[in-house]
Amino acid sequence: MNVFLDFETRSKVDLKKHGLGRYAEDPSTEVICYCYAIDDGPVKRVAHGDLATLLELQAEGAVFIAHNAAFEVAIWEGVTGKTAPDFLCTMALVQSHGLPGSLENAAKALQLGYQKDINGARLINKFCKPNKEGEFNELTTADVRGLLDYCVTDVEVERAIFKRIPALSEYEQKIFKLTRTINQRGLKIDTELAEKATELSKSFLDGANDRLKEITDNRLHSLTQTVRLRNYLNKEFELELTSVSATELQETLPSVADPVAREIIQLRIGFGGNSQAKFDRALNAVCEDGRVRNYLIYHGASTGRWTSHTIQLQNLPRGIGIDPEPCIELIKSGGNDVFEILYDDPFGAISSCVRGLFIADTDKVFYVVDYAAIEARVVAWLAGESKVLRMFRSGIDVYVEMAKQIFNKPNLTKKNKEERFLGKVAVLACGYGMGAVRFQGTCEGWGMDVGSELSQKAVDTYRKTNKRIVSFWYDLERAAVACVRTGKNYKCGPVRFISSREFLYCELPSKRRLAYYKPRIEEGSLTYFTQDSQTHSFRKTSTYGGKLCENVTQAVARDIMADAMLELEKENFPIVLCVHDEVVVEKKKGARFYLNDIENIMKKTPEWAAGCPIDVEGFTTERYSK
């Protein structure tokens, strides 16, 4: 028995600002009404917040289905005080198929005929949030009826999506459930650090904005005015920026000669690393027990990797290479004047402390374990780049070996840190077809000014010494294009392309599938529809061999880590966070072999990845760090 469910709730806590954890635990949060449907039956309306009917269905063994089921789970447990049943999630289904996560946008992408209920949206704004006096507006019977009309449509759309999109595999449902477990555990926050860092950031931002006004003759007033900033740079200096993201600005900066434009860009890059917003969000989201919750999104990225909301944990700043511990102590002591004297880049110094926001609970530590160069290892394994695989297996430093080739210096060692670092960037960045201009920008983002000539040499050297990887790019593209054109399955190394209804599937070695919606071949290029990561619009895009290789590599790396995460949980190593290729376990102090045990579990190669040379690096800490 499947039960499709949607709650309409109200609270004095702002869900977007404070996050689901705070929202669900707040005493003011309540279910106004809800709708549900059993299998293909009519949608039933419940004009109150009593969940007795749902508890009866739970006792009967019903399978509950909701869109963004994390919300229904948190509300269920917050309202009833009882453990919610296992949910299936239609948001997980659409995101696993490269479709938008929101119910409205997923319905539009799938052309389900969903029409936004303007009256329902008006009622939610009026009755589900407090008024200016901080109180709820009084609901009439007609108002509740209007909310139920809105709710009915959501249940119908959930059911339509569930029928349209293939279900998660049993294995992936376990990963979805694990994500729920991690979100419920949460992470403890150093609230004192968050408060003091917010104050300090604001003071330095005021100074940076004053400088921006000065060099633009008061035509720009704030580094946070992203659209005006982009338009100003494009118009005044003939740039072609699509955004003022740190990545795009770092890639653009090497080609910008005008000193004013360079300073504006550098101010914005500096502020872009400023993490005042993360400190604010942490303070807003912290629950009564000092922990934040519900921060991981299952399959948030099209490759299957997790993304984050409330606090964006997947792009925590690297910082500027300073020791964060004394910096954190200085921030907490309130030494603002001393801070500016000690740190030439105050924004960068504060950003270096963002990871330190997260602290282990009393008598516990974090066990932080990261897969070493996992993408470089996986892409070499996928492509059958035997020489690189042998180096990884034998423990040879592949970064040094690449640097030797780039600089034509056979005697280079780890002691040649600058050359080795360039070799590292080449190994990690060039596996997906990156060109010299972008490579130069990437290096600048890492604090290296390598110039156009050396950038080109690094790219050329990588391609010359990794010919099978380069061939793999083109083989993937040919196989994908042939699959779309003919409708037949095509194998490429350990992956396989499958054409099925509206999707081109790329079946990974784990048997999980990446999905490309409405694929077409247009002017020789493979196109499909996806949600743009920058604008969040659902649009047609084109792809190519290098990008397909990146998708496959990151997806395989994710599957290796997901497999290990399930095993860690099984062995009683409670995970509180995963970031890209890193897992964070929170467990009691004093157990000598815990770190070694965790590393051994994560080193274990899944059967489907036999031959992939996996390695990990780990450490323990009471305050999260890199």
Image: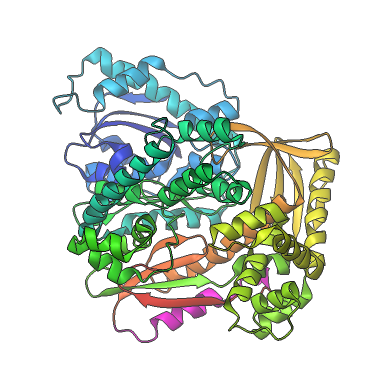
Q: Quadrant of residue 389?
A: bottom right
The residue at 42%/36% (across/down) is 3
Residue 176 in the image, given as x and y percentages of width and height? 47, 53
Q: Quadrant of residue 510?
A: bottom right
Compared across the picture, whether 359 is left or right of 405 comes to left
- Front residue (pair 318, 365): 318
Compared across the picture, whether 232 is left or right of 573 comes to right
Residue 341 in the image, given as x and y percentages of width and height? 29, 63
- Check if residue 248 falls in the magenta segment: no
The residue at 52%/21% (across/down) is 114
The residue at 16%/41% (across/down) is 27
The residue at 64%/80% (across/down) is 397
Residue 6 in the image, given as x and y percentages of width and height? 38, 32
Compared across the picture, whether 473 is left or right of 105 comes to right
Query: Which stretch appears magenta?
Result: 590-610
- Is residue 603 something one can see in this rendering? yes
For this orientation, the residue located farthest to the top is: 142
Main SS, magenta region, reads helix
